[in-house]
Amino acid sequence: MGAVFDPKTYESTLRIANLHRLEVLTHKLQAPKWPADVFGPIDQAKAAAGEKIFNDTCRGCHQNGLYPMIVAGTDPLRANSFGRPVGGVPFPAMVKPVLDGLKARAFSDDGISAADQAAMDAKQVVWRATGQYLARPLTGVWATAPYLHNGSVPTLWHLLHPAQRPAKFIVGNREYDPAKLGYATDGNGWTFDTSQPGNSNIGHAGDTYGAKLTEDQKDALLEYLKTI
Ligand code: HEC
């Protein structure tokens, strides 16, 4: 058995090994560290004060839980669109056979055996419309502007100052704003227009989201968000 070298089996074994390796590697990814040499040092006392505010106000939600739009208050279009019926059939039910077919085709193209398929599909995939938004852990958040599921809020400062969020701003700028924590919103680029369907920058506002924090407290919170 082992004496015959089968290039096809060998190749598919390699592919599976690589897929597994990639999956394992993603768990080792580290959040980018705030580059103090370029953007200036972090004020550790201020960040420590911010950590307490974060624990009291934000951490409870930001643990990978799903929240109804009504709670997040953000633009509902994305959460709703996946649940919209197509030809009288709920979209997740409509899309399932298409996606199952695509997967079967990919397995077959790659010559992956039934046993390997079962191993790779150990966790069953369920297509469903949650109508909700994810409150992700905020690791590395200083580096992931613009914010919210639709990228409608340019900086973390603007997220904490809902009344001052811009109705239109430029995206595609590489100039980072180390004071507001996000990319600069002027210059050349593409204009994000929050008046377009699905682009609204509403929500994540009000007392639950830190509206009552003083400017000093918001400042400390931003300092802490540089460190996670
Ligand atoms: C009631 C639950 C809840 C609380 C409290 C909360 N958040 Fe959120 N947050 C969410 C949800 C849900 C989303 C996703 C909304 C979306 O994508 O439109 C979100 C999105 C965000 C985002 C955008 C993440 C991204 O990837 O773009 C940031 C940043 C954020 N929250 C920071 C905070 C901070 C800072 C606080 C505390 C002042 C806080 N949140 C309090 C539920 C919460």
Image (cartoon, rainbow, N blue to C red):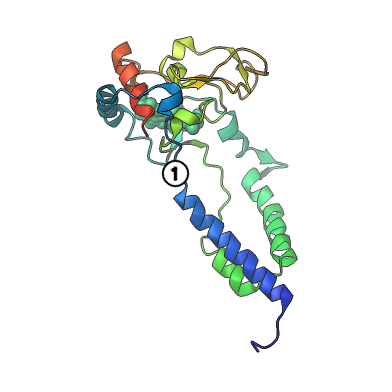
User: 165 left or right of 19?
Assistant: left
Q: Nearer the viewer, residue 175 or 26?
A: 175
Q: Nearer the viewer, residue 226 or 151?
A: 226
Where on the image, by quarter, is ligand 1? top left
Q: Secondary structure at mark 1?
A: loop
Please state the total of marks drawn on the protein image.
1
Give x and y (percent) for residue 47.
Answer: 29, 25
Q: Amino acid at mark 1?
A: Gln
State the quadrant of the C terminus: top left
Q: Quadrant of residue 193?
A: top right
Give x and y (percent) for residue 2.
Answer: 64, 87
Task: Kindly identify which residue carries mark 1.
Answer: 30
Residue drawn at (69%, 70%), measured in percent from left and top? 11
Q: Quadrant of residue 1?
A: bottom right
Look at the picture and state if 29 lies above or below 168. below
Residue drawn at (47%, 10%), measured in percent from left and top? 164
Sort mark 1 into few (<14), some (14-19) or many (20+) by Cα contacts within 10 Å: few
Look at the picture and state if 221 lies above or below 133. above
